Image: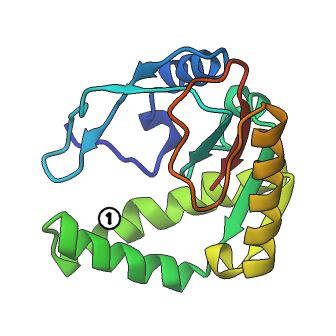
Amino acid sequence: RRLNFDAPESFELEDYCRDIRALKAGRSVPRRGYDYVNHCRKDPGGKLRPAPVLLLEGIHVFYDKRVRSLCDLKVFLQVDPDLCLLRRIARDLRDRGRTIEDISRQYLSQVKPMYEQHVRPAAQHCDLLVPGGGQNLAAAQAVAAHILRLAGAKGKAVHPTSQRQKEAAPSSNLTCGS
C-alpha cells in the first residue's frame, strides 16, 4: 500500500514521541526507516544513541502538539517552493527511479495540497522563521551558536567540525527544524 508521506497522518507519531522522550532521558532507540522505491518499511537496524542536543527535521515536525511540546527551539526554514520542486524532481529521478509524469502527478495531487494544508500553517508554532532556508548564513550561524551553547550546558565539548558525540548524555536538549 502506498502512503501519502506528505500527509501527517502517515507518520507513526506515537512511536516518534516515545522515541524522542527516550532519547531526551538518555536511552537509545531503534533506528527506523522506509524504502521509498519499494514503498515499504525498511528499518536499517541498529540504534540511535542519545546526545547532548537532538535535532529533528522533516516537513511535519511542527504538525503535532505533542512533538512541539518536546522541542526547546523550533526553527522553520522558508524555502522557495520552486526550489523545493526542483530538488524533488532531481531526487526522485536520481534516487527513486520515478518519471517526470509520476513526479508531476504526486506533486499536484499530494505534495502541494498537503504543504498548503499542513506545513505552511505549522510555521506559526515556531520560534524562528528563516527566510532563504539553509542559504541564510546569518541565521544558520545564530542557530549553530545556540545549539553549541545547549551542548556546552550539558558538559560536552562540541565543535562545529567535530564528529557526532559517541557518549550518551541524559536529559538532552532538543532543537527542531523543518
Q: Is residue 38 left or right of residue 8?
A: left
Residue 140 location, x and y as percent? 73, 70
Q: Is residue 105 left or right of residue 23?
A: left
Instruction: State which quadrant residue 102 falls in.
Output: bottom left
Residue name at image x 13 percent, y 47 percent: 38
Residue placed farthest to the front in the image? Answer: 157
Residue 145 location, x and y as percent? 81, 59
Residue 114 location, x and y as percent? 53, 56
Camera-nearest residue between 25 and 79: 25
Residue 23 location, x and y as percent? 59, 22
Q: How is the image coloured?
A: rainbow
Q: Is residue 153 above or below residue 144?
A: above
Q: Is residue 75 left or right of residue 56?
A: right
Residue 102 seen in render = no
Check disc 1 and report the residue beneath it: 106
- Category of crowding for the residue at label 1, using alpha-carbon neighbours closer than 10 angstroms: few (below 14), some (14–19), many (at least 20): some
Say which element carries label 1: helix
Q: Is residue 151 left or right of residue 80?
A: right
Camera-nearest residue between 43 and 89: 43
Q: Is residue 3 above or below residue 82?
A: above
Residue name at image x 15 percent, y 75 percent: 99
Residue type, label 1? Gln
Residue 123 seen in render = yes
Instruction: State which quadrant residue 96 falls in.
Output: bottom left
Q: Is residue 118 above or below residue 166?
A: below
Image quarter in which the C terminus is found: bottom right
Camera-nearest residue between 50 and 61: 50
Image quarter in which the N terminus is found: top left
Instruction: State which quadrant residue 86 falls in.
Output: bottom left
Residue name at image x 39 percent, y 47 percent: 5
Q: Is residue 85 above or below residue 124?
A: below
